[in-house]
Image (spheres, helix red, strand yellow):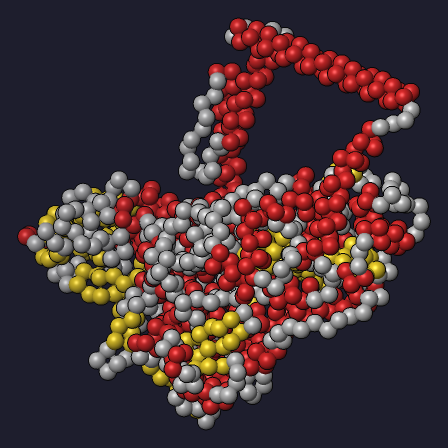
Amino acid sequence: MEVDVDGRVRLVMESALTARDRVGVQDFVLLENYNSEAAFIENLRRRFKENLIYTYIGSVLVSVNPYKELEIYSKQQMERYRGVSFYEISPHIYSVSDNTYRAMKTSRKDQCILISGESGAGKTEASKKILLYYAVTCPTNDRMAALGDRLLQSNPVLEAFGNAKTLRNDNSSRFGKYMDVQFDFRGVPVGGHILNYLLEKSRVVHQNPGERNFHIFYQLLNGGDEMLLKTLYLEKNPHNYNYLAKGNCPRVSSINDKNDWKVVMKALSVIGFTEEEVQKLLSIISGVLHLGNIQFGEGEEGETYITTETQIANLTELLGVDGSALTEALTHKKLTAKGEEMISPLNFEQAMSARDALAKAVYGRTFNWLVEKINQSLALKVKIYHSSKSSSVIGLLDIYGFEVLQHNSFEQFCINYCNEKLQQLFIELTLRSEQEEYETEGIAWETVQYFDNKIICDLIEEKHKGIISILDEECLRPGETGDLSFLEKLEDTLGGHPHFVTHKLANGKTRRVMSREEFRLLHYAGEVNYNVKGFVDKNNDLLNRNLKEVMCQSDNQILSHCFHREEVMDQKRPEMAATQFKNSLMKLMEILMSKEPSYVRCIKPNDAKQPGRFDEVLVRHQVKYLGLMENLRVRRAGFAYRRHFEAFLQRYKPLCPETWPNWHGRLADGVSTLINHLGYKPEEYKLGRSKIFIRFPKTLFTTEDALEAKKPEIGKYACSGSETLGLHVCVYTVIVIQSGWRGMKARRRAKRRREAAELIRRFIKGFIYRHNEYGPENDYFLDHVRYSFLKNLRKNLPENVLDKRWPTPPPLVTEASEYLRMLHMRNMVMKYCRRVQPEWKKQMVQKVVASEIFKDQKDSYPESVGRLFLDTRVGTLVQTLGNDKVQYGASVTKYDRRGFKPRPRQLLLTNNFAVLVDRTKIKQKIDYATMRGISLSSLRDGMFVVHMPTEDNKQKTDVVLQSNHVIELVTKLAMMAGKIDYVNISPGSIRFAVARGKEGIIDFVRGSEMKVAKGKRGHLLVVTPREENRTASCV
């Protein structure tokens, strides 16, 4: 243990060297056999078994996922690492975070922390820990604290929309993320910015067995309330949606979608999303699910048509697009040839591909909008900080590690290309850092031998000859393009390359393990076979032009922002997906090259996500793919151990009589005296300007063992004072301090006991006098009862206006409880009303009126409750009639007053009158002012009679009509005419005026099926189906 200048006690890192046989070394640089992969993995295993998940390779932190909670992330732990030099304390993610922060403050240079590893290795958790460390330990104020909250809350939002369950990880990031956190000159976080890379859009439409789509879909279905799901036309069962059913894994034991939904909704609010934006966002998410449920049929001539009109109707409302235009765009494509546009029908496979392409495009662009919106929330708000002189940046790169799956496709090709570039950067920056330190200390630099993976990067990205260029050329060339012709072109162009192999180019042994549709790349981390199936389509990533046109005209503000009109007008072909990724990767490399890097390499110990289990084969695979052995060799090419003179001398000075107990000369001279006494050979060390460099770990271990052997002697020296008086004074002082401290503790205990006894007495006395008036005898007890009730009430308040639960109050607070209940209900109603959109408010008003008219009166009413009232029930609605705007239209059947002959008509409603129309000809005008009322039966039919005055010979008399939407139509007619109280519902028959002084009768009976016919005595007979026989209802 050591005590620093602030009085804080901390463990010195070197103190663990003595326990190296049990827990291994804390820095791989100190491994004796540093070229042995087995020794490297054994050191990892030892530390993992002791719950020591962090180890250094020089300045690189290696982190092994423990798959359990460890008590090493508390605020006290953060304080322990705060302001402590890198090697003074045991390895930890907080140590990397703190050293990066202090380097940024002292040198005023931008920093970055690169986090990489396989899916499930803990990359996302590592980035969260770093952000949390800065949020807790950095100086801040109220405004900056809000920024810290937004930075932390961006994680659950991005995880919901960008993470998914895979076979390897229940919370796998399916995109790369680079986040900049900006600090002012005082080290206060003042802003942030996020860049995202290569979202796995194909997951939206397809998942492997045992995997899931993105979390947000399941969170919405499990966490969304009934009202929300109803407005989005969704059901809770994920198996009802094709885009969620393919993986056959709707539930995961380690994920609570319902709780995560609440976290995401709260996070969106903290970040600054408005309720309208959240609603639009959820409409898009549900729209993607409905897109997946669109089914196609195929005609005799191969033409395709949509068989699920319900989904189109839902998408029309959710995505704010024209339904007929969307139907046309999903079944036809628009071609331009010699300046002329042609419409070509799609076959079944092409239509399915167009549907999936639209779903991927909508989700991918919405994700980009989401990141853009978060960036607006994190952006610098104070102009002074926009200057690079007054602010510095720490970047966090959380990106996918090297991926080798059973079947590797376009996504793995891009991910592994990214890792090749990062490895190239890693080696280059590590070597540069080493060289700069040697030059600073005045020590000769020795050339380091290492594998330069530039040859592989060039193989992938070189202009005209690289794999990406060949893929783009295949996608752009005229004629039939395909994955196999792309593979053939690769073989022709890259046939002799040492890092490229195909089935055709391979030897007999390799051919046995390679498919004819695969090519193999020899990456820095090992061999990977890529199947070319889907490469061309995924690289094209094109959306039919007419689908873009439909989305550009969306009423949903998010979609209209994501799909620009200029995109449709621009005839220039957009960049291919691989080229876009390459260009964004180049920009990322420029960003990282401009910063001082730190590294976190994450490893997962087993595929089963079990704590305490260490799978050596899996770990060896990751050590190889992360290039850790290569990094260790580079770091050990010179000197294994280096420390500042002061730290080295302070630790080992007891080993030399001349430096113990204190050295009063120059530090360099003290270190030189110490190592000469220890017998260091010239080849074992070098003295720089401010540091000592030790070449071999064995030299350091020998020194550490000598210190351990010396410690008993040091203890005796400290206790053997030559002055007895001084010892007596010391003992007396200790006794006085002890007795004073014990007395104070005893007095505190006695005081607490007295207070506790008095409290219990007051409580018991209050209980006895609880029915008396409030006074000194019972005030404490009664206050406690009130407080307990209010505390319980706070935790159990109703969450919405339909929630009728309320805690039972004690008699003392019954009146107050009722008052609070009324206030809370008013508050919830007020909040609910504020959230209601104008369209929804109009819908609710109509539903309330329909309830007043038809509830418990008409048999078909219950079925209409859950169905929305539409603005029109006719295809093309006439906009105006004279000076009056048409508010509603519906198809009806009119029955002649004499003979009851049925005639198809349209009933159009304006604010002042209604008209019956036959095609374009007005047959009858119904003035609201003269209308006497409306009559209906109580059965399930759609018949209704509009009663008109019979005094005027010029005015036609009552009108007998039938509608398939009678509840909706009569409600709207009654509201517009102001005749809500004049709607009459009769159980048996309805009388109506045929002419002046003459009446007709409609009789209603129940039967086996719906039928309207002329009955006995000239009556009109309407037969309605019984409850058990009905197949459809007129609602």
Q: Pick the quarter of the image with the N terminus.
A: top right
Across and down, in percent, residue 378 comes to 66, 56
Across and down, in percent, residue 105 comes to 79, 55
Residue 31 found in image quarter: bottom right
Residue 331 found in image quarter: bottom left
Looking at the image, residue 747 sits to the left or right of residue 219; the answer is right
456 vs 443, nearest the viewer? 443
Q: Which residue is painted at 67% across and 45% down in the image?
A: 18
Vertical side of 294 occupied by 646: above or below? above
Vertical side of 9 occupied by 968: above or below? below
Across and down, in percent, residue 1021 comes to 11, 53
Q: Which residue is painted at 62% across and 74% down in the image?
A: 451
662 vs 536, nearest the viewer? 662
> Farthest residue toward the left?
1016
Q: Is residue 482 visible?
A: no
Residue 401 found in image quarter: bottom right
> Farthest residue toward the right?
665
572 vs 88, nearest the viewer? 88
Across and down, in percent, residue 75 comes to 66, 40
In the rendered picture of this protein, how many numbered marks are placed on residues? 0
Looking at the image, residue 874 sits to the left or right of residue 638; the answer is left
Vertical side of 181 occupied by 324: above or below? below
Looking at the image, residue 158 sits to the left or right of residue 939; the answer is right
Q: Is residue 768 visible?
A: yes
